[in-house]
């Protein structure tokens, strides 16, 4: 069964450093997403991406964040200058994009980001 | 922000019995609801969904019920198995053109006792 994959599984970085989290969405999916879950809190939406551009973003997704589809398979989340409060599990998801109202999102295993 | 609420942080059920997980929402624009299961150190796994035009959807041991007037949905698992022990998240979205962000509840930890 096709699945979303993410690398690395765990990333440790120093505050102020740039990090890039990588995702390979399911191959025939058209919509891609990033969510995050801070320890003990809800899963929160960050951004959705369609047709090579951001289709929606939350208030969390400020200028420190960017997303890119550098090739036909990868989808990346970049945090330019990490802060302690960026420590969280980051989940990538993808959906077919053809189901209209009933478009189901499938999640990857997550990348645990620890900012020291 | 409490648009999707799961008021029970945990639930314990005996193997073979029914598990009922509940979810309430406040945003009347939500029109698609999903349940995800999550094991520690893994991503949410899609279980079952329901569109707002339906009141019930069944898939094997899993059934989701939607009561739009009460803004309430529930997930029934029967019979419950020890492998069902996980955190269950309710999620919802309001379809609006390209807007597809999911709003999640806080999750319910289900423990199925052998």
Image: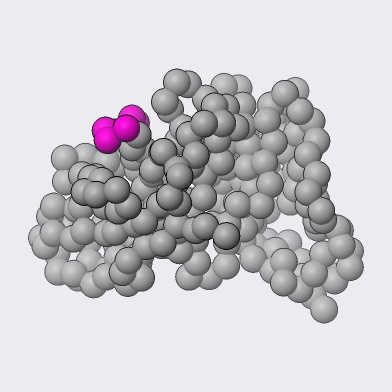
Relative to A24, is B48 above or below? above
In front here: B15 or A39? B15
Dividing the picture into quadrants, the one containing residue A47 is top left
Position of residue A112 measured from the top left corner of the image (x, y, whole percent): 35, 67
In the rendered structure, the answer to whether residue A91 lies left or right of residue B24 reads: left
Residue in the picture at 78% in, 39% down: B57
Position of residue A102 measured from the top left corner of the image (x, y, whole percent): 60, 32
Range of residues picked out in magenta? A51-56
Position of residue A64 measured from the top left corner of the image (x, y, whole percent): 16, 46
Relative to B18, is A62 above or below? above
- Say if the magenta span includes residue A52: yes
Dividing the picture into quadrants, the one containing residue A60 is top left
Count of numbered circles in the view: 0
In the rendered structure, the answer to whether residue A46 lies left or right of residue B4 reads: left
In front here: A37 or A53? A53
Residue in the picture at 56% in, 41% down: A104
Residue A51 is at least partly visible in this image: yes
In the rendered structure, the answer to whether residue B15 lies left or right of residue A80 reads: right
Relative to B9, is A71 above or below? above
In front here: A5 or B67? A5
Task: Report the coloring of the rendering.
Answer: one colour
Residue in the picture at 43% in, 50% down: A27
Relative to A27, is B83 above or below? below
User: Magenta region, mostly helix, strand or loop?
Assistant: strand
Residue in the picture at 25% in, 46% down: A69
- Say if the magenta span includes residue A101: no
Furthest-bottom residue in this view: B114
Residue A58 is at least partly visible in this image: no
Position of residue B65 measured from the top left corner of the image (x, y, whole percent): 78, 38
């Amino acid at each position: 069964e096709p699945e979303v994959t993410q690398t690395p599984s765990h990333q440790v970085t120093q505050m102020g450093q740039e990090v890039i989290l990588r995702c390979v969405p399911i191959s025939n999916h058209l919509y891609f997403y990033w969510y995050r879950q801070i320890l003990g809190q809800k899963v929160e939406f960050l951004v959705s991406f369609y047709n090579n551009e951001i289709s929606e973003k939350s208030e969390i997704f400020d200028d420190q964040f960017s997303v890119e589809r550098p090739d036909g398979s990868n989808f990346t989340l970049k945090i330019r200058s990490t802060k302690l409060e960026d420590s969280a599990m980051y989940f990538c998801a993808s959906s077919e994009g053809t189901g209209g109202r009933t478009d189901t999102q499938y999640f990857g295993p997550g990348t645990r980001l620890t900012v020291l | 922000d409490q648009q999707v609420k799961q008021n029970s942080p945990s639930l314990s059920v005996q193997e073979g019995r029914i598990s009922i997980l509940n979810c309430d929402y406040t945003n009347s624009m939500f029109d698609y609801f999903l349940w995800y299961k999550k094991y520690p150190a893994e991503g949410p796994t899609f279980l079952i969904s329901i569109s707002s035009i339906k009141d019930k959807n069944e898939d094997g041991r899993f059934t989701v019920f939607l009561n739009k007037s009460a803004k309430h949905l529930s997930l029934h698992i029967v019979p419950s198995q020890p492998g069902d022990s996980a955190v269950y998240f309710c999620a919802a979205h309001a379809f609006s053109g390209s807007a597809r962000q999911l709003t999640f509840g806080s999750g319910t930890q289900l423990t199925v006792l052998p």
